[in-house]
Image: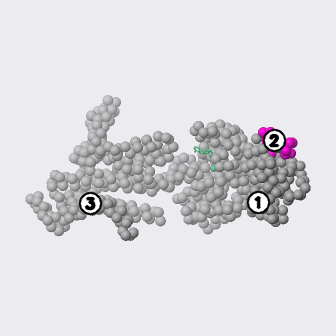
Amino acid sequence: MKGALPFLLLAPALLALVAVFVVPIATIGRIALYVSEGSGAMREAVALDTFRTLFADSFTWELTRNSAHLALLCASLATLIAYPIALFLFRTESRFRPLLAILAVAPLLVSSVVRVVGWLVVLGDQGLINAALLSLGLVDRAVPLINNWTGVVIGLTESVMPYVILSLLAGFGRLDRTVEEAAATLGAPPWRVFLRVTLPLSLPAIALGWLIGFVLSFSAFVSPKLLGGGRVFVLATEIYDLAMQAVDWPAAAAMALYALSLTLLVLAAYTVLTRRVAA
Amino acid sequence: MARLALEGLTKAYGTAPPAVDGLTLEAEEGEFLALLGPSGCGKTTTLRMVAGLVPADRGRIRLGEEDITAAPVHTRGIGLVFQSYALFPHMDAVGNIGFGLEMQGVPKAERQARVAEALRLTRLEGLGHRRPRELSGGQQQRVALARAIAIRPRLLLLDECLSNLDAKLREEMRGEIRDIQRASATTALFVTHDQTEALSICDTVAVMHRGRIEQRGTPEEIYERPATRFVASFIGRMNAIDGPAPVMTREGPLGAGETAMVRPHRVRLLREGAAAEGDNAASGTVRRITYIGDIVQVQAATPLGPLAAEVSGASPLWRGLDVGAPVGLAWSSSDTLRFPA
Ligand SMILES: Nc1ncnc2c1ncn2[C@@H]1O[C@H](COP(=O)(O)OP(=O)(O)O)[C@@H](O)[C@H]1O
Ligand SMILES: [Mg+2]
């Protein structure tokens, strides 16, 4: 009985995990092995036809490149912008610190669709930025900031930033003010303290924050779909189009599994690399 | 290697009473000065102001001929050994010790020679390529010390740097720090709350209380001629007798609103019936007998209040003495200090 207790206590969590994660993925895995007929009908089978078509299609590779490119760009931008913010939040002794921390992650409290609409207002041709640029005479025509890659990168970077900030804060464990002070007493001016002590000690946090930003951007759907204006094609938007517009479920399922395994590959690479560095 | 002068140094955190309150103190060139005081009296704050890590609200800091009150930390050339060591966890011992030299732009060959020298001085040969987490507490302490002296600082600051070590290692390190400081003739400020530590290794002791220096002197002066009631009771053990009472002190009879103080080892223990010698005496009954190392302390209740006398453990005086037994206590007025209460 004693040995069974931990399992009993874990049971609800395990059941939930099975229900919302294992079952859907298994289902997708099953559907990916079905065969789509030319008529659009789906035939039950255990066949690799769909995967064969998927990997033979050069569009798959273009989508993969686009997704990776977008994720790389957004994760790097988000980490670059989030790092000073997280460092400030980690260190400030201000009594407003809790408030500032909430502000930094406040976008999480807003639905991603609402946030995208917000970006439309800011980035659109008649939006805040273009209105300002036009009225200042800095440009003659509205700069296209939306319905293209620029818009997606801006929106997606913003939407993953709270997660990056939180990961950075979680990763700053080894950062110690007195160690930085020690460097200063040894003759290091502030910028050298940063380069020789602060930055190296926050590398684990940066790696973690970047990874979270990458994985989230890689699988993001709302920003590319709504801010890309139908001109930005990534794996996530294509999976949606295959499933909902073409109603080719086996193809959508196969591509979903492919995208998922790429994400797992990145996570595995991160684990191996951080193990190697720590050792 | 310079003279340090602090003049009216003041620092308050928020609205609390100042942590350091008009502190004035001088350390001569090459002097090993202890800053001794109870926890929370402002020692660390003082040290941090000298190092430049905390700005002073008021007052001046002079090092040699230079006023460094407002100088940025990295330009001061002051070695600081932190209580927590604050070693760079991502560098090995060599990297830690060489860091300051690298910042000073010392060429690589010379840097290596000086790091090797610092490793030798702190008896860390062979451990140069270990990271801090691969070193014991005592070894980490040595690396911290080596790192601070490698830059040949004008002033060495040590903040309770021995308090994380066990008793035996602490005693060993005390001697080593003293030797290293002497060999390099560096002016050093050694912060501690441990009086044994301060009295045993420093040339001079400055006793600190509530953000101020109460007394500065040689260990002997501090112990034998405490200037204030606080110093008298903080350093070593003391009997206190509140006046008015029939007690003669160095400075005259004890009046109302005054306190007389005498060290227990200056109080003689007399068996019942023995004639009292000396100009102060009291009789009472034994309350407690305590061993303190090779000394025995006998505490007695007397009409003057509780008084303690200390005798050698080898002495026949206390043998056969039981709680409740009548005893006499006698002490000389020349050993008795008087302070306003
Ligand atoms: N960063 C700080 N913020 C607020 N109060 C502080 C800070 N550092 C020290 N203090 C306060 O100042 C007083 C002196 O502290 P400190 O200099 O660390 O004393 P010591 O080193 O003698 O134990 C203490 O009452 C402490 O609580
Ligand atoms: Mg302290």
x%, y% of residue A197? Answer: 52, 53
Q: Is residue A126 left or right of residue B72?
A: left
Q: Which chain carries label 2?
A: B
- Look at the image and say whether residue B247 sits in the magenta stretch: yes
The answer to the question of whether label 2 and label 3 lie on touching residues, with beta carbons closer than 8 A, is: no
Q: Name the residue under label 1.
A: B323
Q: What is the distance, in whole Å, between disc 2 and disc 3 at their CAs?
A: 85 Å
Q: Please name the amino acid that badge 2 sits on.
A: Pro
Callout 2 and callout 1 share a chain: yes
Q: Name the residue under label 2.
A: B244
Residue type, numbered disc 3: Ala
Magenta-colored span? B246-260
Residue A190 in sight: yes
Q: Is mark 2 on a helix, strand or loop?
A: loop
Q: Quadrant of ligand 1?
A: top right
Q: What separation in Å lies between label 3 and label 1 (alpha carbons)?
A: 77 Å
Q: Nearer the viewer, mark 3 or mark 1?
A: 1
Seen in the image, is B182 located left or right of residue A98? Answer: right
Decide: marks 2, 1 in contact (CB < 8 A)? no
Q: Give the amino acid type for the residue marked by disc 1 in the picture.
A: Val
Residue density around tag 1, few if under 14, some if 14–19, many if 20 or more, within 10 Å? some
User: Which chain does tag 1 point to?
Assistant: B
